[in-house]
Structures are given as C-alpha cells and as structure tokens.
Image (tube, grey):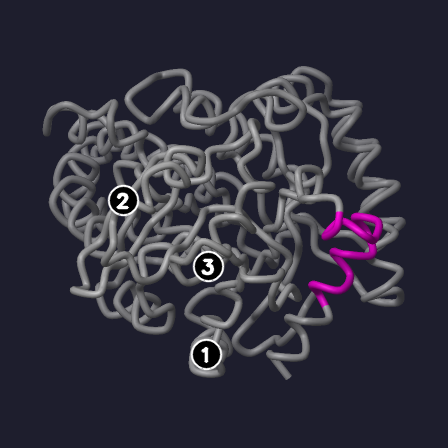
C-alpha cells in the first residue's frame, strides 16, 4: 500500500509466509490469503505485494507467458501491485528441514546468479512503470563455507554481473530493479560493519570491474550502476540480533552511500539469561529453520551459536551471560510470552522517523514463522495475524 508519495513509501508483507514452491501455489495464496489481508487493511486502496518466487515458480512463469498475463490481469482487477520479491530461498521453505540449506546455492555459483536474473525478468512484467522494484537475496553465503578472499571476490563478481544485467534491463524497459543483500546471523555478512566493508572492499572493486568488462563502460559509470542496483535488505530482526541500534545502523548505510533496497520489519525473541527464560525457549527449538542465538555477557562480550538447541544446552555454563537474542521471527505485535520478550521494542520512534525520510521506499513485514509458532501463540488465522501486524506498523508511522 502507498503510505506517502513524496518521498515515496510503500508497505507490503512477504508472501513467504504462505507455503508453496510452485507458481500455482503462490497464485492461490495471493487469491485467498493476500486478498483477505487487503480487505482488512486496504479494502479500497491499491495493495502492494511482496512476492516470494522460488526457482521452480520463476521458471514456470518464465516459460509460460500465459501465466504472467493471467496474473497481470488479476492484479489489475483486484488493485494489487507487486513491488518487491523475496529471492532468498532458492528451493523449499516450508514443511521440510531447511536450516543452512536456505543459503544454497550461494553467490559463488552460477545457479544463484541465473536464478536471480530470471526472477528479475519475470518481475519486470509485474512491476508498475512508475515504481522501483526490490529483490532480496542471500548475504553472499553461510560464513563457515567461505574460506578465502578469493571466495569473496567471486561473490562480488557475480553480484557485479547481476548489476550489469539490471542496468541493461533499466535501459531497455525504463524499470529500476535493485538487489538487496540481506545480512543475517552467522553468514558472510551479518553485521553492519562487515557489510559496509565487503561493499567497499569487494563490490566497489571486483564488482565494478565486472560491470566494466561486461558493458564496456567507465569505472565511474560502473560505480553509479552498482550503487543504484545493489544495496542491502535491512532486516530489523537480524540487525537487533547483533545488539546493534537500528537507527544508527540505518544511518550508517545512508552515510556510506549504500542503497537500502528494502526494510524488512521483523522481530526476534529476547530475554535475560535465566532458567525461566531457557525453559520458555524450549518450544521454539523446532526442526525447520536455523535459530541462531546470540548472548551478550556482563563484560559486553558476545557468544554465538548456530542454532537454538545447542545454545540451550551451553548457556548455563556461562555465568556472566546477561541477555540472549534468538533468530525466531515473532509477530510484531507480540510484546512478551512469559519470560520472553521481543526485539520489536527496538523499533523506536527514532527508527520510524528515519523511515519517513524516504532513503528507502520499500517496507515489508516479514514474519514467516506462523506455521511453527508454539500452539499457545498461534491463536488466530495467518491472515488475521498479518492484518494485526499492518495495524501495528501503521500506528507507528502515523
């Protein structure tokens, strides 16, 4: 939905919450679930869509133009406009063990590059001409998989190839599509500092060199294209997991001239490192997703675990552990659950003031875990819960 025109600000929710890897399943979710949310929050307005396109769905659309035309007609009839795509998960995302496989294939591979370009092609058919489009993607790779600067250089080169393609697409169609790398705990890029360093050291060097090689442009033109078409997907859950201040992190990207392609509004679990908190966390140690866990000690040091089950076992052995935060996306409106709290409290008026300034035009609610929430927290339908999240966000942007 359109929140403001000058500067533009659009709000959607990410359709990755709805299970389905095929376009038929995705389209059914739009028809049944997204329209139900629209009826609750924007019945008589144009309603933005944050599509989720797996490799399967993108291939089906790319090879069947009739499916694209059917969707375009439906979007126009129902006042729907896609302006963002989640191209982070390449394959299955629900109903199976995902864990670290969500990062595969990573940006060292041609599979990730070609999939992303195919998503951009399909997306260009849906994106309104007057609206820029964002695509979120994996933060390079899972950190344990990266062995050297040669890996980082290869990732930057492949990202540069994607930028060259998006720049050519803009030249051909007039549509501006940008790619947002999404920093995430325990990935190649997880903190603001790491992301800025990678952008400056590798993207502006190896990435730009690849753009020059492909397009035959000048170095300054390549940098302009890179800054236009490659930025970050700013996930507030992930930033809060690093114990970073959201507004400060946001301002850092702006001051460095790194585009914020999309802001994903999301929240993680947090709590004091106490027995009651650990007991309350046990129902969240489910087998589908990685739930990276970060602990800050009384001295300010940090301890990390790749997944919650290991953290639950080992945190009691750290007597100076002070506060923990867990990568489990919980509804934005959830203030507490027993001994547990939410990092939604980190989404302060200062942060929302930054959003209103228009450095980033895309906001996306991104709670994808309704299907794995403990039963006592999943008391409403998914559509009702998403509508509540919209009202929570809108109340803070007014």
The secondary element bearing badge 1 is classed as loop
Classed neighbour count for the residue bearing mark 3: other residues with Cα under 10 Å, few (<14), some (14–19), many (≥20): many
Q: Is residue 269 left or right of residue 41?
A: left
Q: What percent of the width, then of the height, locates residue 111?
A: 41, 16
Residue that carries the numbered disc 2 in the rendered image: 317
Q: What percent of the width, then of the height, locates residue 379?
A: 81, 52
Instruction: State which mark lies toward you, 2 or 3.
Output: 2
Classed neighbour count for the residue bearing mark 2: other residues with Cα under 10 Å, few (<14), some (14–19), many (≥20): few
Identified at 22% across, 44% down, the residue is 222
Q: What percent of the width, then of the height, locates residue 40?
A: 86, 63
Image quarter hosting the N terminus: bottom right
Read off the magenta span. Answer: 376-390
Identified at 56% across, 61% down, the residue is 363
Give how far apart the Cα atoms at labels 1 and 2 are.
45 Å
> Label 3 near label 2: C-beta < 8 Å?
no
Q: Which mark is residue 270?
A: 3
Image quarter hosting the C terminus: bottom right
Identified at 18% across, 44% down, the residue is 198
The image quarter in which residue 151 lies = top left
Residue that carries the numbered disc 1 in the rendered image: 357
**Magenta residue check for 381:** yes
């Amino acid at each position: 939905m359109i929140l403001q025109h000058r500067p533009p600000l659009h709000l959607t929710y990410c359709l990755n919450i709805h299970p389905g890897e095929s376009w038929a399943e995705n389209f059914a979710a739009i028809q049944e679930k997204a329209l139900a949310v629209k009826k609750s929050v924007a019945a008589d307005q144009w309603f933005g869509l944050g599509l989720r396109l797996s490799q399967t769905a993108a291939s089906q659309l790319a090879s069947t133009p009739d499916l694209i035309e059917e969707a375009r007609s439906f979007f126009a009839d129902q006042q729907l406009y896609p302006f963002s795509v989640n191209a982070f998960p390449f394959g299955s995302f629900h109903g199976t063990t995902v864990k670290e496989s969500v990062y595969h294939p990573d940006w060292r591979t041609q599979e990730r590059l070609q999939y992303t370009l195919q998503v951009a092609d399909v997306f260009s058919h849906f994106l309104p001409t007057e609206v820029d489009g964002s695509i979120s993607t994996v933060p390079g790779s899972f950190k344990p998989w990266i062995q050297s600067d040669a890996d980082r250089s290869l990732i930057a080169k492949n990202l540069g190839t994607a930028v060259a393609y998006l720049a050519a697409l803009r030249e051909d169609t007039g549509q501006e599509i940008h790619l947002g790398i999404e920093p995430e705990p325990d990935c190649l890029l997880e903190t603001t500092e790491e992301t800025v360093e990678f952008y400056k050291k590798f993207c502006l060097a190896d990435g730009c060199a690849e753009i020059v090689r492909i397009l035959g442009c000048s170095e300054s033109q390549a940098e302009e294209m890179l800054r236009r078409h490659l930025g970050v997907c700013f996930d507030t859950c992930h930033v809060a997991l690093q114990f970073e201040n959201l507004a400060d992190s946001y301002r850092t990207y702006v001051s460095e001239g790194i585009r914020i392609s999309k802001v994903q509004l999301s929240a993680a679990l947090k709590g004091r490192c106490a027995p009651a908190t650990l007991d309350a966390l046990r129902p969240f140690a489910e087998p589908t997703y990685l739930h990276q866990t970060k602990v800050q000690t009384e001295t300010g040091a940090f301890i990390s675990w790749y997944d919650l089950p290991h953290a639950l076992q080992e945190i009691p052995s750290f007597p100076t552990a002070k506060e923990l935060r867990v990568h489990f996306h919980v509804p934005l409106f959830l203030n507490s659950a027993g001994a547990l709290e939410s990092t939604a409290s980190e989404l302060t008026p200062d942060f929302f003031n930054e959003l209103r300034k228009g450095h980033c035009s895309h906001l996306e609610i991104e709670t994808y875990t309704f299907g794995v929430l403990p039963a006592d927290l999943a008391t409403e339908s998914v559509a009702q819960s998403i509508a509540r999240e919209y009202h929570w966000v809108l109340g803070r942007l007014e």
